[in-house]
Amino acid sequence: MPRATEQVLKAMRLSKTPVSKAELVRRTNYNLATVTGHVETLLRSRLALEAEKGLSSGGRKPQMLVFNAEAGNIVGIDLESTHVRIGLTDLRCNVLHSVCSDDIDVAKGPIDVLERIKELIAGLLRDNHLKSSNIKGVGMGVPGPVKYSSGLAASLSIMPGWDRFPIADFWRRAFRCPCQIDNNVYTMALGEQTVESDVGSDNMIFVKVGNGIGAGIICNGKPYRGATETAGEIGHINIGHDTLCYCGNRGCLEAVAGGRAIAARAEQLARDGTSKVLASKLSAKQQLCLADVIQAVEDTDPTAVELMRNCGIAIGGVLAGLVNFFNPSRIVVGGVGSQVGDVLLASVRQAVYKNSLPLATRDLTIQNSYLGVNAGLVGAAILAADESVRHAFSIANAQCEREPLRPKKPS
């Protein structure tokens, strides 16, 4: 897609209301003749549509234009170590259909997991009477380090066999469309930043609390991934205890406040009789997970509440150092752990405000994710949106070139 055409189209995409050519001139700094030419191209490709006439400012009523978000679909994939959430979105990244599956184990390796996800996508398409050719792009978040620039997963002990596996190439071959891959905490941060763009998201830390703990950093409006694209691994900041972490080090935040650590501590409390609620769950399942502890909190079990509070204080203590260093305007808490509600959030806030400098927290807001469980799949779709729209344009433009021009009917 020519750059000027892309800029005109992007101005339409980002507008929440129909726009006139005059407005596109203001937003792109191109002259009216240039904008008109690109608008005609976009109308032919069906990526732009004519809306109703606008209000007159003294002359003719202007023809209003809108981005055709229904010209294709994007697949957003939010992969965690034990489950996956998949969404079909339009080209504006609005979720149309979604599915979640718990029969995932990233330890089985990339081929097994990706083929299972492909089956789920096929079922989603079939259930909604859509063809695979409707898919114009795929975005995917994975629960570990990613070389974003190349679409390759990096080494992580909980994901054997994934190191340097070409995930993006797998999806390009599967659906003949572009694909973008990132660490899922960054897809969550991107989703939150885009949807909540009016509330100070240009300098933001998104904290995912799940089996692992990670942070997605938005700096001056853009994701900050670091020199080797591994920024945000706050789960492995040393907080001074002696517990062994799966990474091989001792003292990691994740080793006491991550989902696996929470579940292990909950099992210990269940076995020693401290919590009858957790003991009942352990007896029924033989093994607890983070979701069980969250359910126990919802059942107002004081032991589970105290456990999650302590985790929040540990996480908040690490975030306090980041607030002093980075001075964000927002901290957003997401992931499975955030579903516990204000129990975790309140203790995070308490620790941050107690241990950060007053100047750094003067305008700071700390809140739960607005998008909730959909943050990762929405962000994954947004990650792929620009390339997906280019792909949709190239297909539509090629179709236009193949079709003979039809003479206009006389008015």
Image (cartoon, rainbow, N blue to C red):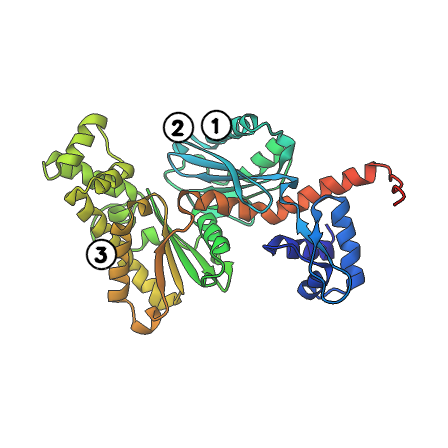
- Closer to the chain start, of discs 3 and 1, is 1
Q: Is residue 252 visible?
A: no
Residue at (50% x, 37% y) in the render: 87
Q: Quadrant of residue 102?
A: top left
Closest to the observer, 49 or 225: 49
The residue pinned by badge 1 equals 116
Q: How far is disc 1 from disc 2 in space, using C-alphas?
A: 9 Å
Q: Is residue 217 visible?
A: yes
Residue on which disc 3 sits: 240
Of mark 1 and mark 2, the one earlier in the sequence is 2
The residue that appears at 78% across and 51% down in the rendered structure is: 40
Q: Are marks 3 and 2 in contact (CB under 8 Å)?
A: no
Secondary structure of the residue carrying numbered label 1: helix
Q: Are marks 1 and 2 in contact (CB under 8 Å)?
A: yes
Q: Which residue is mark 2?
A: 103
Left or right of residue 394, residue 364 in this image: left
- Which residue is at the front of the view, 410 or 123? 410
Q: Residue furthest left?
A: 273
Q: Residue at x 49, y 47 (%)?
A: 379
User: Tag 1: residue type?
Assistant: Arg
Q: CA distance from mark 3 to mark 1?
A: 40 Å
Give the mark nearer the N terminus: 3 vs 2.
2
